[in-house]
Image: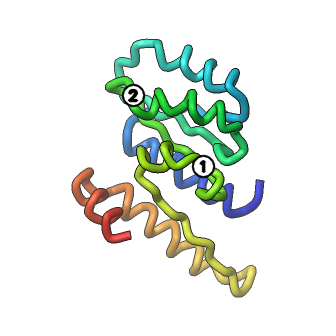
Amino acid sequence: IDKDQEKAAEFAKKLSKSFGKVSYEFSVLKIEDVREINKFTRLAFNETTTLILRDIENATEEAMNVLLKNLEEPQKNVRFILLTTSINKIIPTIISRCQIINIKKQKVQKITDLNIVTNLDNDIETFLNMSIGEKFTYLDKI
């Protein structure tokens, strides 16, 4: 996993905490992986639960199509966060059902210069402390 993927995963974990306390990570490559997620999401969740799906760009087209049903009709207390390094590898029907958040790459000028990392952390922290309405307004601007 490269540094950008690590940043995205860290952001996803922080974002999932803003939805609720419970989150689970899954890797989605094949239809069987999505079927396991389907079994899991059939459970009744009393509190908001976030499923973080990593490396979704590596999933087969068939797996993405099966996943689509979950995205179209999610349970009341289930949220999905899909992580990808390339939105171009995701089928358009999935993209149309998601709110896209780009985590921009940041160049580090010096190894000892922690200012860039601090600014990114502050931006994430500010976003996570916003109300739901403020988050949607912020995301619309992006």
Residue under the point 43% across and 49% down: 96
Point out residue 12 in the picture as x, y percentages from the top left corner. 53, 49
Expressed as whole percent of the image width and height from the top left, the position of residue 16 reads 46, 42
Which quarter of the picture shows residue 116? bottom right
Estimate the x, y position of residue 46 in percent, counting from the top left.
35, 18
Query: What count of labels does the image hold?
Result: 2
Q: Residue 93: image x %, image y %?
A: 48, 44
Which of the labelled discs sits on residue 90, or is there none? 1
Using the image as rendered, state which of residue 33 and residue 94 is in the foreground: 94
Q: Which mark is residue 20?
A: none
Q: Residue at x 38, y 69 (%)?
A: 142
> Which mark is on residue 74?
2
Using the image, determine if residue 118 lies above or below residue 135: below
Which residue occupies the foreground of this view, 120 or 39?
A: 39
Residue type of the residue flagged with mark 2:
Pro
Is tag 1's residue or tag 2's residue first in the polypeptide sequence? 2
Q: Are marks 1 and 2 in contact (CB under 8 Å)?
A: no
Q: Tell me the SS state at disc 1.
A: loop
Quadrant of the rendered image containing residue 71: top left
Judged from this view, the residue extending furthest toward the left is 133
Lateral position of residue 43 relative to residue 91, left or right: left
Secondary structure found at label 2: loop
Q: Does residue 102 appear left or right of residue 142 in this picture?
A: right
Three-letter residue code for mark 1: Ile
Above-or-below relation of 10 to 118 = above
